[in-house]
Amino acid sequence: MLRVGSSLVGYDVEASDGGAGKVQDILFDDTSWKIRWLVIDTGGWLSGRRVLIHPSAVGRLDPASAALQIKLARQTIENAPGSLLDRPVSQQQEKSLYDYYDWDPAWGGSSFGQGTMASDLEPVMYFDQDTLRGAAADGFRLDDGDPHLRSLSELRGYHVHATDGDIGHVQDMLLDDARWVIDYLIVDTSNWWMGQHVLISPHAVSEIDCPGRKILLRILKAKIRSSPPWKPAETVSSAYQTDLHGHYEWPPY
């Protein structure tokens, strides 16, 4: 089922033996657009520590109670390596978590194949600048952070540019909670196309420019303006997806 990504932020996280905190952010891979980690703020249970939980550990989402069940015990989470998230997420830290939990790094495979999105720019981190400066002062190399991890919260608000100009900004993202992949960017085009929102597949993204806070597309503005209409209150039906992907000549999901 498609869900608005930011709607999961604040969900209560329920371990197999009790509360484990709240979802604070979602980190995804900018080459596959797969959700790689849920960032969990454990609150008073672990003295405010933040931990990474892989989507394969999610058991059930309950929108009615805004709760997310995970197939882990609290003690297992507490004993996980690198559970104190006060630095950029390094590939070594991710490897330690994969090994500890016996999670598959290739879980879910690639959704968009190779070469869909590439950038040599500084990775987006959800950590604030004070945290990053403190890590640098401790001798931690900031470029040790995984360069393909992106924060959903960070990218909200980024300007979106077609090949011939600005079309608006990222309002949110739609993710599939079965495949745990971002299927669409929700783009608010009100400054260009009054009152309109459009869905853009990651297939169309050529670059994420972090310093410039913008996302570059491989689409002309005229193509976007002639796309099948969509309103945020409407569900994204399979028929609509067929029309949308046919319009842009995107492969189906």
Image (cartoon, rainbow, N blue to C red):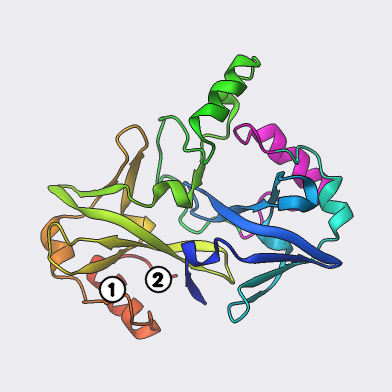
Residue at 57 percent across and 64 percent down: it is: 180
* Within-10-Å neighbours for mark 2: few <14, some 14–19, many 20+: few
Q: Of the residues under marks 1 and 2, which one precedes in the sequence?
A: 1
Which amino acid does the dot numbered 2 rest on?
A: Pro
SS for tag 2?
A: loop
Write the start and end of the magenta stretch as one range.
85-108
Picture layout, residue 232 above or below residue 45: below
Q: Which residue is mark 2?
A: 252
In terms of image quadrants, where is residue 179?
Answer: bottom right
* CA distance for labels 1 and 2: 10 Å
Task: Return the residue nearer the eye: 244 or 82.
Answer: 82
Task: Answer left or right for 167 relative to 201.
Answer: left
Q: Secondary structure at mark 1?
A: helix
Residue 12 as seen in the image, left or right of residue 156: right
Dot label at residue 244:
1
Q: Which residue is more in the foreground, 153 or 226? A: 153
User: Residue 2, percent across and down?
Assistant: 48, 74
Q: Is residue 8 above or below residue 118?
A: below
